[in-house]
């Protein structure tokens, strides 16, 4: 009946294995029209699998060279998809890293991992000076736990954890505006300025995310620091 309605040529095109090549092309086209890279790769992977089926069934003997080529493309696609998924998720992070990532909310998980690979973790066993007023700064600090003391112009103020230190010097290349001392028991994360700047130069997305963090942090510290200055 279908042959009488559509004709033998059309029916042949709609019958496997020829239908596989049409489905493969459909998935490829839909994928390339998709903006989300992960969805695009999923569509291309589906199309590749249909191409493999087509190459297997279209001839009396499977077209092994074409099949192997398609398998290689599928494998590369799967590998790239896994990287994208990891870049977008916190899978594999420890509980400590996940808690810290929540503080770095402007960064994608993959970008967070990238900058944390360059970080040094310091547990302070005794009061330690991190920055000295009017001295050059070559490090960026983040206080994960504990307190730090700010000292400037004969005045002191305590700053709780969850803040960056040296970010203005990092952005503007200036000297430290205050002496900063990490108190006993604090845990501080440290980046080399030059190393972090290279990462930011290579990735505008990371750069914008870090600057956004700095802006949020500065606004918070203006309210928390130097309380004796608010009445002036």
Image (spheres, rainbow, N blue to C red):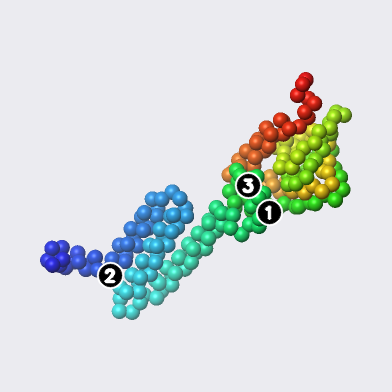
Question: In this rendering, does residue 185 appear at all?
Answer: yes
Mark closer to the chain start, 3 or 1? 1
The CA span between labels 2 and 1 is 53 Å
| Furthest-top residue in this view | 232
Give the structural element (helix, strand or loop) at label 1: helix
Give the structural element (helix, strand or loop) at label 2: loop
User: What residue is drawn where x is 68% and y is 54%?
Assistant: 96
Q: Is residue 90 above or below residue 222?
A: below
Q: Which residue is mark 3?
A: 102
Q: Quadrant of residue 50?
A: bottom left
The reply, left or right, for residue 183 in relation to residue 63 is: right
Q: Which residue is mark 2?
A: 16
Q: Counting other residues with Cα less than 10 Å from the Cα at mark 2, is it few (<14), some (14-19), or many (20 or more)?
A: some
Depth check, front residue: 113 or 162: 162
Mark closer to the chain start, 2 or 3? 2
Q: Is residue 19 above or below residue 96?
A: below
Q: Which residue is mark 1?
A: 96
The reply, left or right, for residue 52 in relation to residue 155 is: left
| Quadrant including the C terminus | top right
**Position in image of residue 189 (x %, y %):** 74, 48
User: What residue is drawn where x is 82% and y is 38%?
Assistant: 149
Mark closer to the chain start, 2 or 1? 2
Between label 2 and label 1, give the one nearer the viewer.
1
User: What residue is drawn where x is 58% and y is 48%?
Assistant: 108
**Position in image of residue 94 (x %, y %):** 66, 57
Give the structural element (helix, strand or loop) at label 3: helix
In the picture, the disc for residue 22 is none
């Amino acid at each position: 009946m279908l042959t009488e309605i559509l004709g033998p040529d059309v029916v042949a095109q709609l019958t496997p294995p020829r239908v596989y090549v049409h489905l493969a092309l459909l998935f490829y086209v839909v994928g390339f029209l998709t903006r989300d890279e992960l969805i695009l790769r999923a569509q291309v992977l589906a199309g590749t699998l249909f191409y493999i089926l087509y190459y297997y069934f279209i001839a009396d003997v499977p077209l092994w060279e074409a099949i192997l080529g398609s398998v290689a493309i599928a494998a590369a696609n799967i590998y790239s998809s896994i990287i994208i998924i990891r870049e977008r998720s916190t899978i594999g992070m420890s509980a400590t890293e996940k808690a810290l990532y929540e503080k770095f909310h402007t960064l994608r998980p993959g970008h967070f991992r990238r900058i944390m690979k360059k970080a040094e973790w310091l547990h302070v066993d005794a009061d330690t000076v991190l920055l000295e007023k009017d001295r050059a700064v070559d490090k960026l600090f983040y206080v994960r736990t504990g307190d730090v003391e700010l000292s400037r112009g004969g005045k002191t103020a305590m700053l709780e954890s969850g803040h960056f230190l040296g970010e203005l010097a990092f952005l503007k290349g200036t000297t430290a505006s205050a002496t900063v001392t990490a108190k006993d028991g604090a845990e501080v994360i440290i980046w080399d300025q030059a190393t972090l700047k290279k990462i930011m130069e290579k990735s505008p997305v990371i750069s914008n995310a870090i600057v956004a963090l700095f802006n949020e942090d500065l606004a918070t510290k203006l309210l928390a620091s130097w309380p004796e200055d608010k009445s002036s």
